[in-house]
Amino acid sequence: RYQVKSDELFTDILYTLQQLQAPLLTLFKTIGQAVESYQNDLTQLKPRFASLRSICRIFFSLNWQDLPEYFEDHMGEWMSEFAKYLKYNNPILIDNDEELDPSPIDKLQAAIVDNLYLYADKDEEPFIPFLSDFTSLVWHLLMNVSKFPKHDVLATTCIKFLSSLIAKPMHKNLFDNEQTLQQIIKNIVIPNLTIREIDEEQFEDDPAEFIMSDMEESDSDSRRKRSQDLLRAMCRQFEEQATKICLEHIGTMLNEFGSSNGEKWAHKDAAIHLMLGIAVRSGSAQGVSTVNDKVNLMEFFTTHIIPEMQDTNHSVRPMVKATAIKFAWTFRNQFTKENIAVLMPLLITHLNSPSVVVHTYSAAAIEKFLTCKDISGQPQGTASATGMAMLASKKVKFGANEIKPFLEPLFSALFAIIDNQEWNENEYVMKCVMRSLSSARDDIVQVTQIVLEKLNAALFVVAKNPRNPQYNHYMFESIAILVKSVCSKHPEHVATFEGLLFPPFQTVLQMDVSEFTPYVFQI
């Protein structure tokens, strides 16, 4: 699938198609007939549904690079079979007590919707006549998926399909109705943005997995990320209507949170995520470049985000605190130096949170704020390419002078996390150490001794069993920044550096830790 297009590649695909394309369709239909014959025989149905799913994945691969002529000519037959299984229901294949593992029907339906997404995303003309019916079928599927993890893949795949359609002006007529938009937001977006029990458990018991699925820049799918993608697609086509509907829901959810004495905290979490979905108009890895001008972002930030971050009771609403921190870093380009100065001590306080997600998000936020460029002269609505070019040429908003008063409490909190042997090596925290050292410049001297000792201790620990390459990289980068910043201007410190660094370096070389050897010689 991921090969660059070439004559050699298409020769291989053509050969495969000639051998497989007709038998594949025949087999799919034949197995379908057997499925109808064995409606009440679980042992016969299970392997046949697994085979149907495998054929769908082969279909996906064969159509990935281009729409083959045979598939175009037999589009009606394939689509008829796909539609049949999107409507299929058989209680014998469904275990109502199962919460984690998808049923054979769920797996097949997710594979079929993936195929539909492939055609819709490529704007394949022969698929257009089938689009309206499949939109209704996918919509119906989404209305009936449970909140249990067993339906996560099916839900995210269906939401991805709808997002791809809503985002394109050519399909605007399918959704151009306020009642339709209301239903999408109320019945699809909000339920899939709302915290579930399984999310709470993952937040506490498997924070690394939670972070990976929740971080904006990660590649993993989650219901929340897909729902926000859907919202952003809606705002591209129906910004005024979608914003109005969402703001009404946000107001309702925040009122419910406020009147519940904090018990309905999941409503506030969902409201913040809903705001994240509608407020971003465009952006990149460097942050949001333009925001939805129909949203009062700063009022929301002041009224609902800052008070949440000012609550220093780490045991109260940790998931909402994590979401508030994520909101803050998402709109870092929109904040002034003064806004960041208010946020910095709050973020340092949350580095002390016993919640891995909260202190990780705090470290990630600080790191992002320290690289945030000053674009105060840039007008709202500047085109992305121009905006990002300007961004690259600007100086940072929160540099050496601004971070200086916070260096000691910042490093104290960061190394308290790193020193805790109960927590896994946290690359976001170590990246924050690296960025803080880089930002501090000459002011690094005041914390050199303690930082070097802590990094040295961390090096001794990981040298015995290197596990996290990103963490290790940021650790050595931090050491290199210290060496370069301090020893070049203060040669009297060289002996101290050598005394601390040579023992672990010698250990690395003697143990032949291949991952670390290049770093040692470079430093």
Image (tube, grey):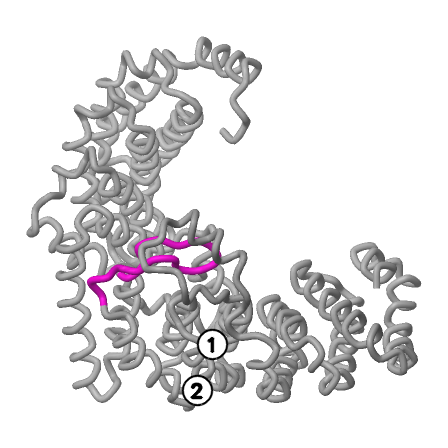
Q: Which residue is mark 1?
A: 358
Tell whether position 282 is magenta: yes
Identify the mark at residue 314; answer none if there is no mark. Answer: 2
Q: Position of residue 47 (x, y in %)?
A: 38, 33
Q: Measuring from the top left, give residue 305's x and y in whole percent.
A: 33, 78
| 1 and 2 marks in contact (CB < 8 Å) | yes
Q: Quadrant of residue 278?
A: bottom left
Magenta stretch bounds:
279-295
Q: Earlier in the sequence, mark 1 or mark 2?
A: 2
Residue type, numbered disc 2: His
At 44% across and 81% down in the image, what residue appears? 343
Q: Residues within 10 Å of mark 2 (few under 14, many from 20)?
A: some
Q: Nearer the viewer, residue 462 or 308?
A: 308
Quadrant of residue 441 in the image? bottom right
- Residue 299 lies, in percent from the top left, at 26, 77
Q: Position of residue 403 (x, y in %)?
A: 58, 81
The answer to whether residue 23 is above or below residue 364 is above
